[in-house]
Amino acid sequence: MEYKVHINSLENFKAWSGAVTTLNTVRERGGLDTLTTICEDIFSGDIPTETQINDWLWFESDFIYQALGYQDLIEA
């Protein structure tokens, strides 16, 4: 079975595991609108699954932080 859910912002995304840290950090810094736009650009043309979004948030946190200008959070 397959279903699609439309969300207007990652504010409503229910992250799990390591993605929670990334999402909460961006939320605390007020960058959710920009993060949503970046996510839309990354998955442009595709409809990502919740797992793909979660994995992107989890494993691409350095890319996300860099794109948002959070240089202090990028691991060396």
Image: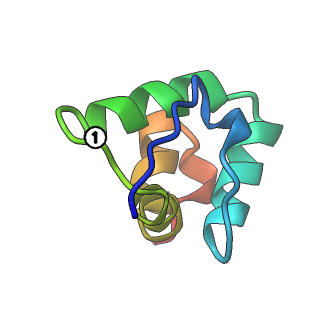
Label 1 Cα crowd, 10 Å radius (few <14 / some 14-19 / many 20+): few
Residue 52 is left or right of residue 34, and the answer is left
Which residue does the image show at 64% across and 57% down from the upper left?
22
Q: Position of residue 30 (x, y in %)?
A: 75, 28
Which residue does the image show at 71% across and 63% down from the upper left?
20
Q: Nearer the viewer, residue 62 or 42?
A: 42
Given the image, on which type of amino acid does mark 1 rest?
Ile
Indicate how the structure is coloured in the image.
rainbow
Which residue does the image show at 61% across and 65% down from the upper left?
19
26 to 57, vertically: above or below:
above
Of all residues shown, which one is farthest toward the left? 45
Which residue does the image show at 66% across and 60% down from the upper left?
15
Q: Nearer the viewer, residue 32 or 45?
A: 45
Residue 52 is left or right of residue 20, and the answer is left
Q: Position of residue 26 (x, y in %)?
A: 68, 42
Of all residues shown, which one is farthest toward the right? 28
What element does badge 1 sit on? helix
Q: Position of residue 32 (x, y in %)?
A: 65, 30
Q: Nearer the viewer, residue 25 or 76?
A: 25
Quarter where residue 12 is shown: top right
Q: Which residue is mark 1?
A: 42
Residue 74 is left or right of residue 45, and the answer is right
Of all residues shown, which one is farthest toward the front? 1
Of all residues shown, which one is farthest toward the bottom? 17
